[in-house]
Amino acid sequence: MSVVLCLLLLFLFDACQANTVTLETLLDEMVNREKIARLPEIPFSLKQFSSYDRRAIAPDQPGWFANSDSKWFIREEINQGRKEYVMMDAEGPGAVVRIWMTFASENSGKGILRFYFDGNPEPVIEGTAFDILSGNLLVGEPLASSVSDLSPYDKRGHNLYLPLPYAKSCKITYQNESITAFENNRINGESVYYNINYRTYESGTTVETFHPEQLQKAKDKITEVQEKLQNRYRGLDKINLSFKDITCDLSPKGEKSIQIQGGKAIRHIRLSIKADRLPEALRTIIVKAEFDNEKTIWCPVGDFFGTGYQIRPLNTWYAHVEEDGTMDVYWIMPFEKSANLSFSNIGDQTVKIIGEIGFGDWEWDNKSMHFGVSWHQYTGIFTRKGLTANNPGEPLDLNYVALSGKGIFVGDGLTLFNTSYMWWGEGDEKIYVDNETFPSHFGTGTEDYYGYAWGGRSNRFSNHPFIAQPDESGDWKPGYVVNLRHRSLDIIPFEDHLKVDMELWHWHSTWVNYAPTTFWYMRPGGKSNQVTDVKGALAKVALQSTDIIPNQMVNGIMEAEYMTFHNSCGNKRGSMSINPFGNITLGNNLQVMWSDGMPGDSIFFAFQSLQAGNYNLTADFTVGPKFGNFSVFLNNRHIKDITLFDQKMGTKKVHLGNINLKKGDNILLFTVNPSDGNEHIFGIDRIQVNK
């Protein structure tokens, strides 16, 4: 055989190998930071199977916000005498790239998962859900993991990131003896929640189907990838980096700009912020960037680094924040000709920034993309759309971002402040790719999207490569929350359009601040609908509920729902809520109701007075057959005993006495007294003070 022929055959073999998808190539892609900044070499689409409530048909039809997001399957099958429920059934070539699940029942997570590839009647993977997703049956941490490790194991989110390629098709089923019936695509018995992200490659793509034997064959590669993920290998040791210092004092309206010329890529930004009012500085120092004269980044600095407006330690594949406030990002930001990265102070205090930018060479080609970050805040948004006396209202879809152009969606973060003693994150993600009329990604809850489970019961976690909840203090009580999802093999390519929405589905009617940050790459010419949000960045940062709830008295009247309220028994059953009262006329159509208090428990309200003085205090209460008796206190002084019991549902105006108000916060407290009935419902519409 001639040398030329040998070289030709070798070239063809290498070309064939380069266009073949295997377990090893997917693992390499997972830890190759440069690949994410270019369009995929082997094109694919990314979609999702999930257990979302199938009553959701369309935004203009009932059921769009239906929330029974467990137990839904594609169908029931009998396989070799076993009753199995189909979670995923997709034609290939393709690859499963992320599975998230959680469960609820006596035998939760002990059901059997089976993976059938290429029409084979025998499962290629078989084992309990826990063993496969977060145990060691296939791989270990972090490719198989559960979060948070501060939570009971069966109440965690279980995440499998091991890629599972297939040449023709993939079917995943679940079996558990606790499942008792199947009707209308839903089971009775164990609660099963799942989200499965999978790639579908173009027809004709060569894919090597996964088989467990490959785990041994690829043992060294798996070990290498696991170590790189665990250690957050940045790859900067192999790059000849140049650095530019960005240390300076930024006065109000000041700006620090860095220009870089030539085909380069920013690969590392390190920054720390010093300010008298640090939370405000983390919101009012704005990171901006233009690549090749296209504006693609506008984001408050804290959200850009994933920590929001409070310093919270975290360590993902792309972001790292230390306790001392040192912040790093490792997104690759390429450009063909020029870059202008700036830090702008839109606040009213001087802020010191300390840090540097590291950049290196980049070979720009027709697959290279510009990096983009979009941010905006829904400030003081009310969680029930259309709430009136005759309408209980409903959740609402909030837009994270809408992108126009060709690119990939690579992650997002959410910073919010909750003002209620209830879970805020029942809402599902709805992601539309290339003008879909129904989202190809329809989830089962905000916490599920971010990889954990069961609301705030999952506690904080911040040390997984791709998902994090650095602060969960506001999950089930007033407080601050940060969620992050940095995508890996589950990046979402789009040809001309992408829209990411998330339901704001809160268990209570209340006000919250809700600020999403999105990360993406697009070819030159791409556009984001979220460009700048100066008003949101300048809004008062919420450190307590009164920073959000409209705690203002108008003409001596304060609506109860506008006051900050909570109770002494910890609201364990979550019964305090803002709601209408049937057809009874109320101020602002709303009242505050509390239904699970017991004798000795208290509910108290904070309201502000602009000046101290002597006033008459009256209040409008709601009354009814199951309402109770209460002692009333103002600023720790007993002022009156009242009864809200009545044979009929209605309202009642009560003069609470001549009182002294303090300038600033005043506390109005109601303690449950014993009564003849077994229930002690409390309801208040408004208070009024007069000189």
Image (cartoon, rainbow, N blue to C red):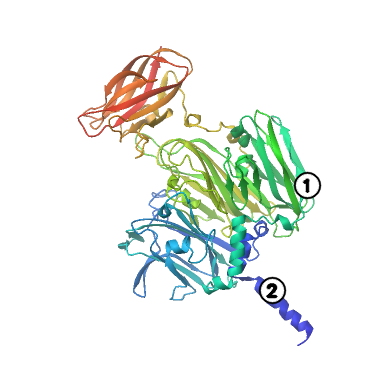
Residue type, numbered disc 1 = Ile
Looking at this view, name the residue that lies furthest to the bottom.
1
Q: Give 379 or 107, whichever is nearer the viewer.
A: 107
Q: Give 435 or 603, whichever is nearer the viewer.
A: 603
- Which numbered circle lies on residue 684? none
- Residue placed under numbered mark 1 in the picture: 260
Q: Quadrant of the C terminus?
A: top left
Residue type, numbered disc 2 = Ala
Which structural element holds mark 2? Answer: helix
Identify which residue is drawn at 23% across, 27% down.
646
Among the 4 quarters of the image, the one containing residue 194: bottom left
Tell me the crowding category of disc 2: few under 14, some 14 to 19, or many 20 or more residues within 10 angstroms, Cα based. few
Q: Quadrant of the N terminus?
A: bottom right
For residue 119, above or below residue 140: below
- Residue placed under numbered mark 2 in the picture: 15
Q: Position of residue 21 (x, y in %)?
A: 60, 70
Among the 4 quarters of the image, the one containing residue 375: top right
Disc 1 versus disc 2: distance between alpha carbons? 36 Å
- Residue 202 seen from this side: no
Q: Position of residue 312 (x, y in %)?
A: 57, 42
Give the mark, 1 or 2, whose residue is nearer the N terminus.
2
- Residue 209 seen from this side: yes
Q: Position of residue 664 (x, y in %)?
A: 48, 20
For residue 608, above or below residue 371: above
Which structural element holds mark 1? Answer: strand
